[in-house]
Amino acid sequence: MMGGDKTGRVLLTAYFAVVVLYLFFPILIVAPMSFSDDRFLGFPPESWGLRWYEAYFSDPVWIDATVRSLRVAAVASTLATVLGGLAVVGLERWRTRWRTALTVLFAAPAIVPNVIIALGVFVVAIRLGINDQELTLAAAHGALALPFAVMIIGAAYRQIDPTLERAARVLGAGPVRAFVSATLPSLMPAVVSAFIFSFFVSFDELIVALFVMGGSETLPVRIWNDLRFELNPTIAAISIFFVAITTVAMTLAELLRRRGANQSRV
Amino acid sequence: MPAADRHSILAAPGLLLLVTFFVVPVGIVFDQGLFDPAFTTAHFERFLARGAYMAVFLNTLRVSVVVAMACLLIGYPVAYFIVRQPPRRRPVLMFLVLVPLWMSILVRTYAWMVVLGREGIVNGLLMTLGITDQPVKLLFTTGAVYVGMVQILLPIMIVTCYSAMTEIDQNLLRAARILGARSGQAFARVFLPLSLEGAVTGTLIVFILSMGFFITPALIGGRRDMMMANLISSQVSQTNWGFAAALAIILLLATVAVLVAARLLTRRLVYAAAKTDTP
């Protein structure tokens, strides 16, 4: 630590605590409200209960939107993870002068504002007559999540020692078998982590869904349409429900990613 | 290397997805904005002719610059604090910073709506403390947009700064101290120049992400806080696709232009800092 600069250290610690409080502030407020039994939003709640969770789970409109979002996210994240994983292997082993350009291309959807991609996908979908279809949205979300999958799997792939796979080849395994038995196992944590991450990219996405999906709402679209008219406490319950799920899933993804990194280093 | 080149086929499916759902759509946006059906600059003239559209564009730039700077000023010391902790404690502290990032932007914006509303907690607190006797207008203001956007983007800044700072050999600081530098000097002449690159990258990432913001300005900003993404969306819902596309082109080009300019400018800055501090 920086010498005897104790006041500085205390100040910096206090500062850190304030910033973390700011970052957590929304969750800290919404969590108690979601367990309120009052009829209107108020803080702190006067009575406690699960009425807004019940309101969520018993309303077919909310459940429909949730299930649709889950379906779209499942397809989108599968696409992003499988195609992203294949692309990592392909690009890493392919000696070409296009490699830099391709790497940039695979990162680009993460940089270009989503509203631009949304507008383009919307126009393309209308021309092809495939707007208002879950598969179209899932594919578009897959493209949006692809950069993250490539980044996560790529980082793990570059850590892996290629000797093992080469040894498998020398011992007579075919190229696919050698990859599956020698390289894939140490890549698996990153693959799962990429899947979870891509899942939430899709599950959270609003603008593309807003443009592409006419009548059928995804969960973010439903929340969006609801928020513009009233502050519905049901949204507090939904928020906390999914914050809990996301935190568990992302923690898992992070642990897996780390374990993967450690394994391949050993 | 024919054996290695066969692997290129593995990248093909991903490439196909990218081309269909990213390259072609972005191409179509350019086509829609520039051709109708013959080449035209009408949409861009419309943008320039009306002050209201220009105001939205300038507001987008201003908000993005302010948010990026605020994130840098708030986030850099946080990253510094974490990196100066013992290595075993760092992941836990980073975890605290990262958890809010996993909350949907919609949800976080919703929370600010609840907090800053007329009957929200902040107003309740102000009135209980007797600072005001009437609710203050906090929601639907520019300030609310800043508070909301910085909260959303700050973790990204901290992560970027932090990963650059972990690359710095902590022994360099110790060496500077041993050689007689006071702690402030060691920071300013050793740590700061070495971490500048990461800080610049973080600022640019936050800036890019800000330029495309949609949810937060729409839900907690006022009428004059509209950003380009909101304008594009409202033009789409009025089926003015050509004009929406032109706005999208302007947004994309402005983002790229600022990015390139900032890179050129800061590269010089980073080099200058490095030169003066390594005799």
Image: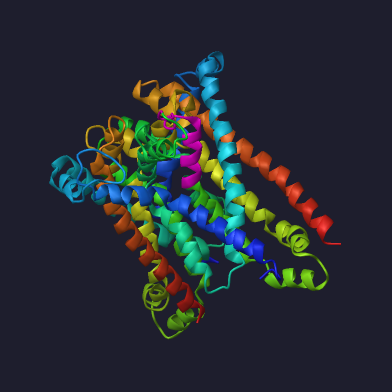
Q: Residue at x 49, y 40 (%)?
A: B147
Q: Please, which residue is most extreme toward the right here?
A: B279
Q: Residue at x 51, y 53 (%)?
A: A19
User: In which quadrant of the rendered image does the N terminus of chain B lie?
Assistant: bottom right
Q: Please, which residue is most extreme toward the top here?
A: B49
Q: Is residue A229 above or below residue B199?
A: above
Q: Is residue A124 above or below residue B277?
A: above
Q: Would you say residue A79 is visible in this rendering?
A: no
Q: Residue at x 21, y 48 (%)?
A: A47
How many numbered marks does the figure carry?
Answer: 0
- Left or right: where does residue B277 sit relative to residue A259? right
Q: Is residue A140 above or below residue B163?
A: above
**Residue bounds of the magenta highlight:** B134-152
Q: Please, which residue is most extreme toward the bottom here?
A: A171
Which residue is more in the foreground, B4 or B87?
Answer: B87
Q: Residue at x 50, y 62 (%)?
A: B94
Which residue is more in the foreground, A121 or A70?
Answer: A70
Which residue is more in the foreground, A28 or B216?
Answer: A28
Q: Would you say residue B254 is visible in this rendering?
A: yes
Q: Where does the image place residue B122, in percent across and percent down from the top left?
A: 41, 39
Q: Where does the image place residue B83, in percent across and percent down from the top left?
A: 60, 65
Q: Quadrant of residue B129?
A: top left
Q: Where does the image place residue B82, in percent across and percent down from the top left?
A: 57, 64
